[in-house]
Image (cartoon, grey):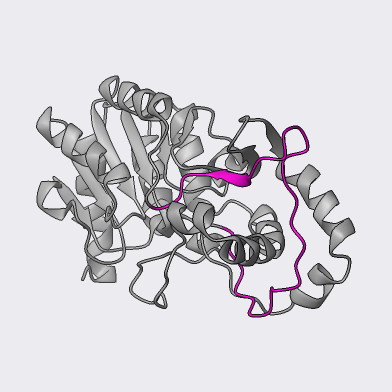
């Protein structure tokens, strides 16, 4: 593990590597832990079993359980605020040192922090889609209807909850939660989020690769790179000779491909990088 005393030297090495280059950031759940949103695979994270697409579409009871938990959890994610790491990346973009952000997170914190070029690879918590007619509506609009159908649910469930990165709140009793279908075609509604076992839309993948191809280097922040949706960008950068810098607490799938790897928190390192890279 990186010792605290070693960080300034290692950050300076990363700054020298990225100085004068345009960089793309790839971020994961570890980016948002300082905003109060837990990650999936960090060293201190409890075991989690993220929902799969097959579970959601194939089991009505599981779907009811998910919507009940999300009905509470999405508000907690919606209320989260950007941390120093998010703001640092937005600052680097404004300074011309960052080409954009590819994020695996669904929390919109990069956009809230002021980043302008963001590819939300896995979608966001703020939209809901019908799996039959593809009609989209805001999560806010759906929440109003669900609150009318379940007037006592949110108030009884908000205190002291644990919420996963996908806005899934840990609630045990959900069997009485009432769901709704698409108001246009009565199809199945689903948060517009890419679940495990579901493919990332091709247009988002293409936009992310185009952003990376226009950059000189890749900066990974807060991702274990366990799933291919993020790891492929590390492989692509390494294949094309672009430096890869990884900042993450714990090992990642891409460590062998990294030009530099820091075992450290995102906010601390990124804020120092802003100072180093924007210094006149």
Direction from residue 109 to residue 68 in the image, left or right = right
Quadrant, the N terminus: bottom left
Residue 116 placed where, x, y %?
54, 28
Q: What residue is rendered at 41% in x and 65% in y?
A: 40
**Is residue 267 shown to the viewer in this render?**
no
In this picture, is 51 found above or below 271?
below
Q: Which residues are magenta?
A: 167-196
Q: What residue is rendered at 40% in x and 34% in y?
A: 278
Direction from residue 230 to residue 76 in the image, left or right = right
Q: How many marks?
A: 0
In the rendered image, residue 168 lying in the magenta stretch gets the answer yes
Residue 14 placed where, x, y %?
23, 45
Q: Nearer the viewer, residue 81 or 280?
A: 81
Quadrant, the C terminus: top left
Q: Nearer the viewer, residue 171 or 255?
A: 171
Direction from residue 44 to residue 164 in the image, left or right = right
Residue 135 placed where, x, y %?
67, 30
Q: What residue is rendered at 33% in x and 74% in y?
A: 43
In the rendered image, residue 183 lying in the magenta stretch gets the answer yes
**Is residue 116 shown to the viewer in this render?**
yes
Direction from residue 136 to residue 147 in the image, left or right = right
Which of the 4 image quarters holds residue 205? top left
Main secondary structure of the magenta stretch:
loop
Q: What residue is rendered at 12% in x and 46% in y?
A: 257
Residue 12 placed where, x, y %?
24, 48
């Amino acid at each position: 593990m990186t010792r605290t005393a070693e960080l300034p030297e290692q950050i300076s090495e990363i700054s020298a590597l990225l100085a004068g280059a345009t960089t793309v950031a790839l971020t994961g759940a570890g980016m948002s832990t300082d905003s109060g949103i837990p990650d999936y695979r960090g060293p201190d994270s409890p075991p989690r079993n993220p929902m799969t697409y097959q579970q959601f579409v194939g089991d009505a009871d599981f779907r009811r359980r998910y919507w009940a938990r999300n009905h509470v959890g999405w508000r907690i994610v919606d209320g989260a605020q950007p941390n120093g790491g998010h703001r640092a990346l937005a600052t680097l973009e404004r300074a011309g040192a960052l080409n954009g952000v590819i994020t695996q997170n669904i929390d919109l914190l990069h956009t809230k922090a002021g980043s302008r070029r963001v590819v939300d690879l896995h979608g966001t918590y703020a939209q809901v889609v019908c799996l039959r007619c593809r009609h989209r509506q805001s999560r806010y609009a759906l929440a109003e209807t669900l609150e009318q159908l379940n007037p006592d649910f949110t108030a009884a469930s908000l205190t002291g909850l644990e919420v996963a990165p996908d806005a899934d709140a840990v609630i045990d009793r959900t069997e009485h939660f009432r769901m709704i279908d698409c108001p246009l075609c009565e199809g199945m509604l689903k948060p517009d989020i890419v679940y495990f076992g579901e493919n990332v839309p091709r247009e988002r993948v293409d936009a992310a690769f185009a952003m990376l191809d226009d950059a000189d280097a890749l900066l990974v922040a807060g991702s274990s790179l366990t799933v291919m949706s993020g790891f492929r960008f590390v492989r692509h950068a390494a294949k094309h000779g672009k430096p890869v810098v990884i900042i993450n607490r714990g090992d990642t799938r891409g460590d062998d491909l990294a030009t530099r790897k820091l075992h450290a928190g995102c906010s601390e390192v990124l804020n120092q990088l802003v100072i180093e890279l924007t210094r006149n």
